[in-house]
Amino acid sequence: MLNMLALLQEGAASAASGYALLGAGIGIGLAILGAGLGLGRIGGSIADGIARQPEAAKEIAQGPFIIAILLEGATIIALVFALLFKLL
């Protein structure tokens, strides 16, 4: 009887590990997708602003870099957390 219980527990542990890997993969995919969309919108807005006012290109291009840096930082944090949850 105890052998059967040990086999059931082992199967449940491997299933939970599979779900952890699936969750980590989905989390990593969503983080990368969100970062790509965000950076694409930032870049598109910069290009649109420079096309409308070419003489103000330096001022237009300087501001969004801070937002892009913060977006990349949030993406890296999301990736690290997803990988940590995979390992736990």
Image: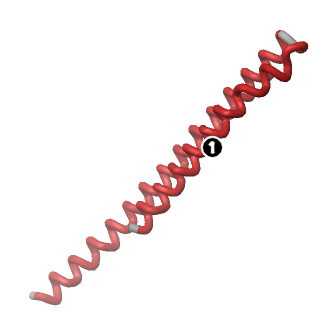
At label 1, the amino acid type is: Glu
Q: Is residue 11 left or right of residue 80?
A: left
Using a 10 Å C-alpha cutoff, classify the residue at mark 1 as few (fewer than 14 neighbours), some (14 to 19) or many (20 or more): some
| Count of numbered tags | 1
Q: What residue is rendered at 57% in x and 38% in y?
A: 34
Quadrant showing the N terminus: bottom left
- Location of residue 8 (image quadrant): bottom left
Secondary structure at numbered mark 1? helix
Q: Which residue is mark 1?
A: 72
x and y percent of residue 66 in the render? 67, 33
Q: Is residue 51 left or right of residue 22?
A: right
x and y percent of residue 25 in the render? 50, 56
| Above or below 39: residue 21 | below
Tell me which colouring the rendered structure shows: secondary structure
Q: Is residue 77 left or right of residue 62?
A: left
- Location of residue 10 (image quadrant): bottom left
Closest to the observer, 65 or 4: 65
Q: What residue is rendered at 15% in x and 82% in y?
A: 5
Q: What residue is rendered at 60% in x and 38% in y?
A: 71
